[in-house]
Amino acid sequence: PLIFFSLTLSSSLWIIIDTQDKGLFYALTIFSFSGVIIGLILMRLSTNSILQTSTDLEAVDFFLLVEVTTTFCIVIIAGIAALIFGPDSLIKGFGSGITIAMLIYFSYLYKKQKQSTL
């Protein structure tokens, strides 16, 4: 997972920095590939743990809640990015937002791991 995290972070930075269409295409390709792999891994892990601890009805409710929350967050992020960067630079807004979110998540995991070793 750390390899795909690094790929996603570097490709989102590439999206922010590059201004040529060809470079953006390659960056989006790498970003999409690594994002799908990370999503599949996380979905598999969460599905196993949820199905072990809950009933079928609770699992369906949880997955519907996650889907609605994810969709809502994407709409909010797209709206904010369109307001800040303009509709023509929306992809750069996504790249900036994802980079910031991943760095926050990485620092959270690092702090959590550091506290568990103490």
Image (cartoon, rainbow, N blue to C red):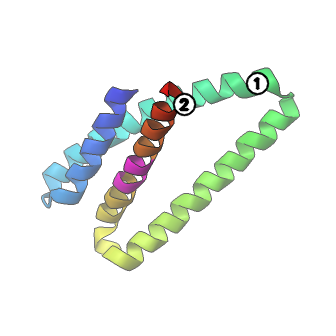
In the figure, 42 relative to 65: above or below? Answer: above
Which of the numbered marks, if any, corresponds to residue 88?
A: none
Q: Quadrant of residue 92?
A: bottom left
Please state which of residues 74 and 2 is positioned toward the viewer in this rendering: 2
> Disc 1 versus disc 2: distance between alpha carbons?
14 Å
Residue 64 at x, y = what percent? 73, 46
Residue type at mark 2? Leu
Residue ID at (28%, 38%)? 30
Please state which of residues 109 and 54 is positioned toward the viewer in this rendering: 109
Residue 33 appears in the picture as rendered = no
Which of the numbered marks, if any, corresponds to residue 42?
A: 2
In the figure, 99 relative to 34: above or below? Answer: below
- Whether residue 57 sits left or right of residue 7 in the image: it is right
Residue identified by numbered label 1? 51
Q: Seen from this angle, which residue lies furthest front? A: 118
**Mark 1 falls on what kind of element?**
helix
Mark 2 burial class by Cα count in 10 Å: few <14, some 14-19, many 20+:
few
Residue ID at (40%, 47%)? 102
> Which residues are the magenta region?
99-104
Residue type at mark 1? Leu
